[in-house]
C-alpha cells in the first residue's frame, strides 16, 4: 500500500507544476516536490508510535518513560519499601509491578517440575505470543498466569525483528512474579539477539525502535542499561538452564565448545558478566570468544540441523558429558516443533517471528506434545 501511496503522491506533485514552466525546470521542480512528499510519507508513521514504558532507577527515584502517539511522557516515583505499580498508559496494556527488592539471578538448575511449556524466538511478536500462551492454558484471557505450579521456558530471542519487543519483555517480567506466587516459574534464557542488542549490533532492529531511541534521546542499547529495570532483569538471566535432566539453550552445544572445558555455571557467569561488551573486547578474551563468536557457540550453533549434522554417536556423547537426557533448542526456524536424534534434541523455534503461526512444547512427565494456536494437543512425532 505504501508504494501505491508514494506513486500517487508523485503523480500529484508532478501535476502541481505549472504547464508553462520550461521543461527542464518543470522536471527539477517535480523531482523536488516528489522528494518532499516521499519524505513526508516516510516520516509520517513514526509520529504515531506507541512504546514503553522504559523504567530507570537512580538512587531512590524511579522514572518511567513512554512514547504515546509519538509524544514522550514520563512518570516519576519515589522508591519505598513496598512495590511500585505503574498503570498502563500506552503500548504495554497491563499494570506493571516493580518489587522493592530485586529478584536474585535466575536459577540454572531446577528439579521436580510438574509440567513445562516451552516456547522460543518471540522476536517482538507480542500478540501472537499471547494468543499461543492463552490457547494452551499458560495465561488467561487477562494475560495473567494460569499454569499453576508449571514452568514456562522461553529459549531466547525476545529482541529484534518485530514491533512489540518492549511488550514481550514486560509480559515475561510480570508473569515471572505471578508464576512464583503460584508455586511455578518463568525461566528465560538468553539468545544471540539479546546479546547482540546489548552489544550494539542492531542489524535486525525494527525501524520503529530506531525512531523510539531518537525520540528518547539515547542509543537503543542504553534503553536496557544497567540503570533500568528490564536491563537489570536481563542481566540476571542464564544462557544455559537444566530442568529435570533436560538442557535448554538457544543455539545448542557443540563438541568443539565442550572442548573448551567450561562448565555450565562458569559459562553462565561469564555471559552475565560480559553482556554489553563490544566485539573487540570479546575477541581479546579466548573464553568470551568461545561463548560469543562464530557458529560453534551456545547462542549460535546449528549443528543438529545442517546437512553435515552430528551423528547419533556424537549426540549421545554430548548428552553423557553434559549429564542430561535431551537438549531443547531454539534459533533454527522450523514450521513446527521437531524431534531429532530419537527425541534427544527438540527444536522449538516454530517461526513465530513471521507473525503468523507458532507452537509451544508441552511436557508432563514422559509425555511430550505440540500445543497449537488453536489449542490442539498434538503428538511430538519421532524423527
Image (tube, rainbow, N blue to C red):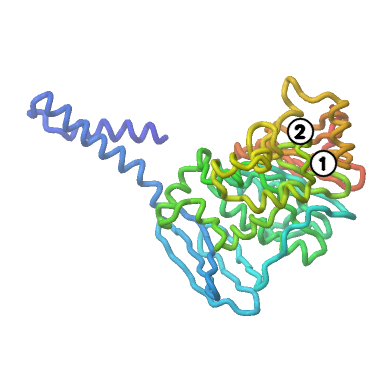
Q: In front: mark 2 or mark 1?
A: 2
Residue 354 is left or right of residue 213, and the answer is: right
Residue 319 is left or right of residue 52, and the answer is: right
Callout 2 touching callout 1 (CB < 8 Å): no
Q: Position of residue 116 (x, y in %)?
A: 82, 49
- Quarter of the image for residue 360 reads top right
Q: Quadrant of the C terminus?
A: top right
Residue 95 is left or right of residue 148, and the answer is: left
Q: Quadrant of the N terminus?
A: top left
Identity of the residue drawn at 79% across and 45% down: 263
Residue 231 visible in the snapshot: yes
Identity of the residue drawn at 61% across and 79% down: 80
Identity of the residue drawn at 15% across and 33% down: 17
216 is higher (above) or lower (below) than 207: below
Of marks 2 and 1, which one's residue comes earlier in the chain? Answer: 2
Query: Label 2's element?
Result: loop
Q: Position of residue 33 (x, y in %)?
A: 22, 36
- Quarter of the image for residue 78 reads bottom right
Q: Which mark is residue 377?
A: 1
**Mark 1 neighbour density, 10 Å: few (under 14) some (14–19) many (20 or more):** some
Which of the pair 66/218 is nearer the observer?
Answer: 218
45 is higher (above) or lower (below) than 295: below
Residue 133 visible in the snapshot: no
Amino acid at each position: 500500500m505504501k508504494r501505491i501511496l508514494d506513486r500517487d503522491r508523485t503523480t500529484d506533485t508532478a501535476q502541481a507544476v505549472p504547464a508553462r514552466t520550461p521543461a527542464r525546470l518543470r522536471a527539477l521542480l517535480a523531482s523536488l516536490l516528489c522528494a518532499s512528499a516521499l519524505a513526508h510519507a516516510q516520516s509520517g508513521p513514526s509520529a504515531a508510535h506507541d512504546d514503553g514504558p522504559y523504567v530507570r532507577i537512580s538512587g531512590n527515584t524511579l522514572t518511567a518513560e513512554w512514547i504515546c502517539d509519538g509524544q514522550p511522557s514520563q512518570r516519576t516515583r519515589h522508591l519505598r519499601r513496598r512495590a511500585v505499580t505503574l498503570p498502563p498508559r500506552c503500548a504495554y496494556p497491563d499494570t506493571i509491578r516493580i518489587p522493592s527488592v530485586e529478584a536474585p539471578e535466575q536459577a540454572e538448575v531446577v528439579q521436580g517440575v510438574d509440567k513445562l511449556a516451552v516456547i522460543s524466538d518471540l522476536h517482538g511478536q507480542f500478540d501472537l505470543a499471547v494468543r499461543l500462551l492463552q490457547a494452551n492454558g499458560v495465561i488467561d484471557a487477562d494475560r495473567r498466569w494460569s499454569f499453576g505450579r508449571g514452568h514456562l521456558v522461553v529459549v531466547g530471542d525476545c529482541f529484534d525483528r518485530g514491533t512489540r519487543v518492549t511488550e514481550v519483555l514486560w509480559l515475561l517480567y510480570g508473569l515471572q512474579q505471578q508464576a512464583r506466587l503460584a508455586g511455578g516459574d518463568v525461566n528465560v534464557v538468553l539468545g544471540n539477539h539479546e546479546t547482540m542488542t546489548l552489544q550494539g549490533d542492531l542489524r535486525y532492529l525494527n525501524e520503529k525502535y530506531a525512531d523510539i531511541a531518537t525520540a528518547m534521546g539515547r542509543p537503543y542499547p542504553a534503553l536496557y542499561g544497567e540503570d533500568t529495570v528490564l536491563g537489570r532483569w536481563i542481566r540476571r538471566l542464564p544462557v544455559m538452564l537444566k530442568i529435570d535432566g533436560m538442557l535448554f539453550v538457544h543455539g545448542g552445544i557443540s563438541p568443539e565448545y565442550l572442548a573448551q572445558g567450561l562448565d555450565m555455571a562458569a559459562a553462565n557467569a561469564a555471559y552475565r558478566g560480559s553482556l554489553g561488551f563490544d566485539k573487540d573486547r570479546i575477541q581479546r578474551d579466548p573464553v568470551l570468544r568461545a561463548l560469543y563468536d562464530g557458529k560453534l557457540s551456545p547462542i549460535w550453533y546449528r549443528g543438529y540441523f545442517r546437512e553435515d549434522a552430528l551423528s547419533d554417536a556424537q549426540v549421545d556423547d554430548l548428552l553423557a558429558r553434559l549429564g542430561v537426557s535431551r537438549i531443547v533448542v531454539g534459533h533454527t526456524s522450523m514450521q513446527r516443533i521437531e524431534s531429532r536424534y530419537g527425541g534427544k534434541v527438540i527444536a522449538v523455534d516454530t517461526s513465530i517471528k513471521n507473525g503468523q503461526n507458532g507452537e509451544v512444547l508441552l511436557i508432563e512427565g514422559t509425555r511430550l506434545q505440540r500445543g497449537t494456536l488453536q489449542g490442539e494437543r498434538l503428538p511430538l512425532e519421532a524423527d
